[in-house]
Image (tube, rainbow, N blue to C red):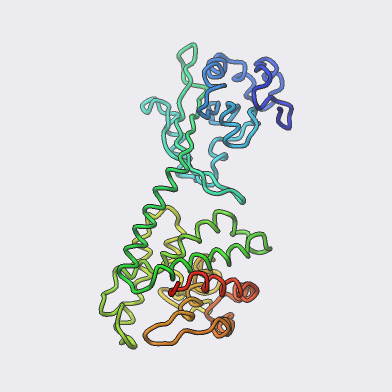
Amino acid sequence: MTDGEGHAVNGDEPLELEALAEEAADGGEALIASGEFAQWSTVRLDDPVPCLFLDASLRILFANRSAASLFGIPQRLPGLWFTQFSAPWFDEARSGELFRSVRSAERGHRWIGSIERTGTDQLLEVYKVWILPLPRPDAGEPRAFQAICLDITPEYHSLVQGTFQSLLEAALRKDNDTGNHVERINRYARELAGDLHGRDGWDEVNRQFIESISQAASLHDVGKIGTPDDILNKVGPLEPWEWEIMKEHTKNGAYILRRYHTPMAGEIALRHHERWDGTGYPYGLDGTLIPLSARIVSIADVYDILRMRRTYKEPFTHESAVETIAAERGLQFDPQLVDRFLAIAPSFARIFSECSDSA
């Protein structure tokens, strides 16, 4: 098999160093014909561990067969920088630290760390990476590197899931909301975000956005861990001073989630009580200054609270809840999101029925 440029990808053909050197037009031809590449290809070409061959500026010149298969790329690359390969995770600060490390003799011309890769239709992937210099025959400064990449995505997601469950269980023990309530919030948010995916004007919504919000939504009230029990569980209306304390759960939630793996969780916790017209809390943001994730969860949360039985109210029917949200179009809620909610409202009714508190 070959890539679009006719280079062998799966190793059915022998590696032709001279042919690759003649074809190269990006300044890497000398390295492809060098002793460093010959050494690297001898050791790494058939290695089951994914590995990339880089020049001194960390452009990717070649991927071994395992890396080509893992990343879905041709073995012969046109010189994409390693930092571009992992953009946007490699921001200016991370890129600077990487280059300082590989150019520093004191650091051994090496860098070890974890990187993240994602894309429009790609879920988050996490890799442990070792970028190591390939020794030159003349023992000079390294002019080629290898990047050894191990996929730790399953382990990463397992760790994240464990953290998520611990936070969620702590929040549920503190508040009197049920586990079904937070499960429904996740499912509503996924449903509404999924409806936006691929529609004009919602470029922010990709597969990773949908995956993230379908978990992060349930942590929207985690800040209530810091709310006094006598206020949180009070029967009847709150006094003005009690209400001010209650509103602090948004800031508390953002603080608790500040080191959570996705910033979305913190932004939802902080912003889900902001209103489209700017009269919400904690900071009175309006319009699109409110993150999209928080605007979605705001609709999901209000719908479910309306449908639930509370000590201070009877449960709304689905039709009444939909009418209430529609009446707040452009006031409490993003008007375009309300339009999409109205279009898929039957799916909210289905989720509430499938995951009811009496089930």
Looking at the rendered image, the quarter that the C terminus falls into is bottom left
Picture coordinates of residue 309, whole percent (x, y)? 42, 82
Q: Is residue 235 left or right of residue 35?
A: left
The foreground one among 274 and 233 is: 233
Q: Is residue 93 above or below residue 264?
A: above
Dividing the picture into quadrants, the one containing residue 331 is bottom right
Picture coordinates of residue 246, whole percent (x, y)? 33, 77
Dividing the picture into quadrants, the one containing residue 165 is bottom left
Image point 63% across, 35% down: which residue? 73
Outermost residue on the front side: it is 359
Outermost residue on the top side: it is 138
Picture coordinates of residue 51, whole percent (x, y)? 53, 28
The foreground one among 322 and 227 is: 322
Image point 49% across, 68% down: which residue? 294
Q: Is residue 119 above or below residue 143?
A: below
Looking at the rendered image, the quarter that the N terminus falls into is top right
Q: Is residue 124 left or right of residue 241?
A: right
Picture coordinates of residue 18, whole percent (x, y)? 68, 14
Image point 59% across, 82% down: which residue? 326
The foreground one among 236 and 202 is: 236
Q: How many marks?
A: 0
Q: Is residue 126 left or right of residue 260?
A: right
Q: Is residue 253 above or below residue 43?
A: below
Image point 54% across, 66% down: which residue? 292
